[in-house]
Image (cartoon, grey):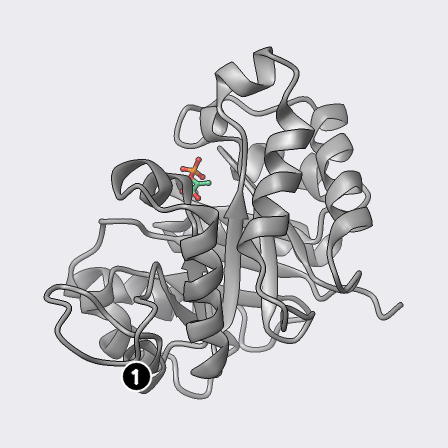
Amino acid sequence: MNAPRKLAAGNWKMNGLRADVQEARKLAAEFPSSAVDIVLCPPATLIGAMAASLIGSAVRVGGQDCHVAASGAHTGDISAAMLSDAGAHHVILGHSERRADHDETSVLVAQKARAAHDAGLVAIICVGETEAQRDAGQTLDVVLGQLTDSLPERASATNTVVAYEPVWAIGTGRTPTLEQIAEVHDALRANVPDRAIPLLYGGSVKPANAAQIFAIPNVDGALVGGASLKASDFGAIVAALGAA
Ligand code: PEP
């Protein structure tokens, strides 16, 4: 198989004002070219400004969600075509915060991924177990079930990335053991429809733990929340991925 591409993706969540676009410019200055793919996903309000400030750089921009429809009467929503038009190249779908806060199901995530693919976007599809599910020994069943139901038929290494994000590790400073990450990533690799689909780990990735995590087989990069907000932190994670 072709080796999966390495990707460091930053999820700014509901953080960032116009002045913070300078963090993206600093990151781009640090990596004028890059052996690994780099994507920042700011809130929708910043996508256009960030994309404009990154033209010609190695850093790409992504959205954090999209609607299943291309346009229409959906107040407050954003379509994949609009993200693309604003300069986005990727879109995060099925993040656990959207699954929890907006009752998003894997079936809906697959519909959104189809819409993203139709608009030419790369879908970063998130899966992950809660702490209760892990404690009940259900991790692989939950994660592989989400994988099966969230990936659309056309998912391939050119249009899809899968991010394994244990819900209990997001924003908590807690991470699974390296063996626990390896177990899930091995299972994901065995079950993705295209074995070159990049598999990211997400959940409290920091400069201090990035190298260890990137040394795990079948980990092709990271989806990073808090540590992606500052170019100094995220740059260290990108550098660790490049060295892995
Ligand atoms: C995330 O939001 O996808 C995430 C992994 O957050 P953090 O890195 O802050 O745990």
> Residue at horizontal 38%, vertical 79%?
54
Does 102 sit left or right of 224 as displayed?
left
- Which amino acid type is marked by label 1? Ala
Give the camera-side residue of 161 and 10: 161
Residue 22: x and y, percent? 28, 66
11 vs 54: above or below: above
The quadrant in which the N terminus is found is: bottom right
Give the camera-side residue of 144 and 89: 144
> Residue at horizontal 49%, vertical 27%?
169
Q: Give the residue at mark 1.
A: 52
152 vs 237: above or below: below
Q: Residues within 10 Å of mark 1 (few under 14, many from 20)?
A: few
167 vs 136: above or below: below
Q: Secondary structure at mark 1?
A: helix
**Quadrant housing residue 65:** bottom left
Residue 243: x and y, percent? 73, 54
What is the tally of numbered marks visible in this picture? 1
Give the camera-side residue of 124 and 99: 99
